[in-house]
Image (cartoon, rainbow, N blue to C red):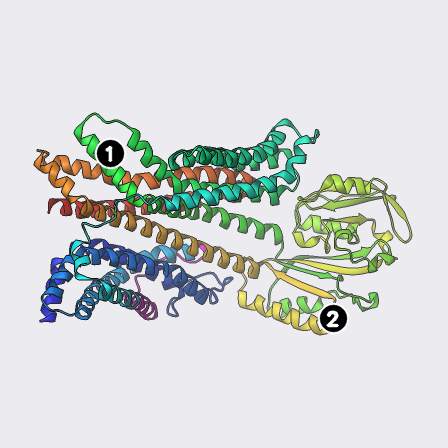
Amino acid sequence: MYNKLLINNIKKSSKNYIIYIFTLIISVAMYYSFLTITSKYYSPNISIEFDISILGDSIKYALTAISLIILFLVNYINNFLMIKKFKEFSLQTLMGMKKEKIALLFFLETSIMGIISVLLGIVLGTFLSQFINLKLLNTFDGVESFSFKLYPDTILYTIVFFILIFLFNGILNIRKIKKLKIIDMINYEESINISADNKVIKRLNLIFIIVNIILINENYINLKLYYDNRLPLMPRIFYISIFILPIILVLGYFYNIFKKKSLYSKTKYISILGFIQMIIFFISPILFINYKLPSGLEKMNYYIMIGIIFEIYLFLVFFYLFENRIIGSKESTAQKIFLRGQKISKINRQKIAFGFISISIFIAIMLFLFEPVIKSWSTGYLNSRMSNDIIIYSSYKDTININDIKYDNYDSVFNYLDKNNIKVKEYTPIDFYLLREKDFTNRNKYNFPVLAMSLSQYNAIRGMNGYEKISLDNSKYAIQANEIADLEKIKNKSNSGIETDYNSFILDKIYTDYFSEYIYPTHNDYFIILNDEYLKNLTFVQNQLYIDFFDDKIAIDKLSVLEDNFYRYYTDFDKDTDYSRKIRIKTIETNSIKMVNFSISIFMYYLAIVLFIISFTIIGVLEIEDSIANKKRYATLYNLGLNKNEINTILKKQLNFSFLSPISLAIIGVIFLSTTVLYSLRDNIFLYMGVGIIKELSFILLFILALILLYYNITYNLIKDNVKK
């Protein structure tokens, strides 16, 4: 009997399960496709200079952690499906069926549909996994190929993960059904809460006022900069604005309370001032970069974070303000009046939900937008660090006794390269010396001794990097400074010249040509260049070695052995001296950065897609719930003479509002924040971004549009069916 009832329930409720099945299929497909690259059976044809063996577990656990959000989504849809079946449950209870049996049948019903969705999701995931595979092959210089394989361990992992989600939700549903009374189940649809709950808005306003009070205190400290006549007019206006506006906002809010103004008036007032403050915080990078304001990067990031907090508040109160705006509007036709009433009813019940949906879509778009930015930035950073195939550098900062410093020309490295037939194209050793031996004991991080290298070695490293040689008069010295160094500070420090233990010199020129960041000695962003003969009697403290290969592609396992051998040998060589030697190998560094980039891409894309799925599913469920709550209104319209096409047009307009409002709000938020962040990073970004990024973003955009259209059509057909009934 129960088997028959279960089958009948599934047949009868099949339409209600469409959004559940579709959401699960997409969720499973995404989970499975991203997880395939962690399978032990996955063996991509990538270049010999890369090793992705350590990629698997980290991605597997991270994706699973993100996928736990789906637990909330499945629970949310299950609650909706339960509401749809409450009358059926009440009738079954009245007929004598135990609640435990009803709950078990519902659990089996959702689980069967769930398992079908998981299997279909794995099939779809097999196709989607090709895009993940292609992304990995592109990242690690592999041979592009399509391979529609099924990975047994990934299939098992996916099935077990989603079955655990079904079991967890099943237990929650069984407990909920057992607690419900028959009368509650019968009247649930009619008792869906339509009253406006403004407690959340009041709390949000209070939190926002507290944030502004904190800002008053924080910005008071910077108020002195307003009186600094050295600053141009615009920065001074900025500093006075960020101090005065929070004061006006807080005082105005309490004045509105004193005058017993409505919640809408208070919220509107602080939202307008909050919006103005947000704009000011978001334009702060322009001021900090163009006018080089004090505490540059640190303060700029702080103001951007405050701007984001203000933006989140505006997301959450927007639909409350919009609801009151609609209430005040006047419409001419009966259909427009009805549509306005539907919008008011919808927002009245779900204003905070729409606010959170906007935030989810906002975060998802930002993740998609900034993934290529982060990837390009980290790749550029790698290039700035590793200009040569091997860089070896040392440091004496922890060495107490100067006699513990041993000179070494790194023959062990050359012997290993020769033994493994790795041909060296060119190499340059660099030796650094203290200007005065007494400076050896100076370990002040902020005033660490500046070191000197010979002109011949400096010209050799310039040659390796494609620069022309330089020359120096005997009485002069040159400086090589990092691109990010404070040149004014270096010039002021060098105006009086330098003194060594044996001679004194005056400054010839400061060079800022690009070199690897490793060339700069410990705690310094510049070094001294002297003619070779003046270094003979100075105290040697550390050295470096730069090597370039003929072959661009060398097996990473060979170079990993070289790295291990280096640390093993020099740990023993410098034993009990605290002298530090490190080796950096471009192939290994590139492999590490590319793995980090790929992992970040996977996490950001996956989280963004999960957030989109959650947002669109919740919009769909809210629309279906709304059609249940307002079905009598549609019946009245039909009885008043509106035909089915006219009612369907009203449904489409409602659905357009529900989908487009949070998406539009999120896009506006993205424009504000992304403009700010991209401006602050513009020099780094545009240097490294290429055409591949545009293709990648185009594909993502098409995927999102397809997702929106699918959810839109499924939701429309379901609410049309509800209204038709």
Q: CA distance from mark 2 to mark 1?
A: 79 Å
Note whether 61 is above or below 18 in the view shown.
Answer: below
Instruction: Point out residue 570 in the picture as x, y percentages from the top left corner.
Output: 70, 70
Taking the spot 40% from the left edge, 59% from the top edge, the residue there is: 66
The range drawn in magenta is 139-166
Taking the spot 56% from the left edge, 62% from the top edge, the residue there is: 588
Instruction: Give the left or right position of residue 495, taking residue 624 as reference.
Output: right
Residue type at mark 1? Arg
Instruction: Point out residue 47 in the picture as x, y percentages from the top left corner.
Output: 47, 61
Q: Which mark is residue 340?
A: 1
Residue type at mark 2? Asp
Instruction: Point out residue 76 in the picture as x, y percentages from the top left corner.
Output: 29, 56
Give the image quarter of residue 396: bottom right
* Residue 142 located within the stretch drawn in magenta: yes
**Number of marks in picture:** 2
* Outermost residue to the right: 502
Instruction: Point out residue 330 in the picture as x, y percentages from the top left corner.
Output: 26, 26
Note whether 306 is above or below 574 in the view shown.
Answer: above
Note whether 688 is above or below 248 in the view shown.
Answer: below
* Front-most of residues 38 and 389: 38
* Front-most of residues 557 and 251: 251
Note whether 462 is above or below 664 in the view shown.
Answer: below
* Front-most of residues 145 and 84: 84
Mark 1 surroundings within 10 Å by alpha-carbon count, few (fewer than 14), some (14 through 19), many (20 or more):
some
* Residue 250 located within the stretch drawn in magenta: no
Q: Secondary structure at mark 2?
A: loop
* Residue 681 can be seen, yes or no: no
Mark 2 vs mark 1: which is more N-terminal?
Answer: 1
Q: Given this view, does label 2 or label 1 mark the residue nearer the observer?
A: 1
* Residue at the disc numbered 2: 574
